[in-house]
Image (cartoon, grey):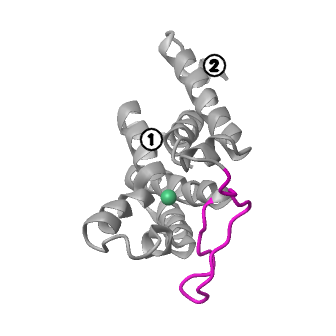
Amino acid sequence: MIVAHLPTGYLIGALLERRFRPAACSPRLWLAVALLGAFAPDLDMLYFHLVDGRQHHHHSYWSHWPVVWFGALALALAWQRLAQQTWVPTLLVLFTLNGCVHLLLDSVVGDIWWLAPWVDQAFSLATVTPRYQPWWLNFILHWSFLLELSLLGAALWLARLRWRGGSTQAAL
Ligand SMILES: [Zn+2]
């Protein structure tokens, strides 16, 4: 879901901002962390291209393992509960939450090793059947692309509301 990751990260960051953004954290930093978390698992593409020589599906790397991201989210939530000063752990919760959502989006039509490292099997909700050339037409003509466009549209709509002088709070 390459189109939907950043818009979804923006949506989650913007929707959680009112309730959870610490006063010590600027709105820009809050949204930057949200976007970074939404994209972070795909940073393994650098390893995929530059080091691994495209030998293995990048979703099979630990950077796309749910146990890593959901475990990190659990630790961040625990730290947030226990911490005296909460803005750093709160940003970590936002970052890891968006990393988890990234894996959920990847699971729609992309293989995710949900049970790694214990079971070497990938799972996905649906399969994109190769029917058309060039290859990317198969993704654009698949129903899952509507989900991507919907998330992009929702993010653009929310961003427009915010840029028109309002805030998320006022818009919702
Ligand atoms: Zn990914």
Mark 1, other Cα within 10 Å: few <14 / some 14–19 / many ≥20: some
**Which residue was labeled with disc 1?**
22
Question: Which label is found at residue 45?
Answer: none
Sooner in the amino-acid sequence: mark 2 or mark 1: 1
Residue 45 pos. (x, y %): 36, 61
Quarter in which the C terminus is drawn = top right
**Which residue was labeled with disc 2?**
171
Depicted 72 relative to depicted 164: above or below: below
User: Residue furthest toward the left?
Assistant: 50
Amino acid type of the residue tagged 2 in the rendering: Ala
Relative to 142, 90 lies left or right? left
Which quadrant holds residue 115?
bottom right
Residue range corresponding to the magenta coloring: 110-131
User: Residue furthest toward the top?
Assistant: 164
Which of these two is toward me, 18 or 71?
71
Amino acid type of the residue tagged 1 in the rendering: Pro
- Give the secondary structure at mark 2: helix
Q: CA distance from mark 2 to mark 1?
A: 20 Å
Depicted 154 relative to depicted 99: above or below: above
Q: Nearer the viewer, mark 2 or mark 1?
A: 2
Total labels drawn: 2
Residue 111 pos. (x, y %): 60, 67
Q: Residue drawn 59% across and 54% down?
A: 101
Depicted 150 relative to depicted 37: above or below: above
Which quadrant holds residue 28?
top left
| Residue 124 painted magenta | yes
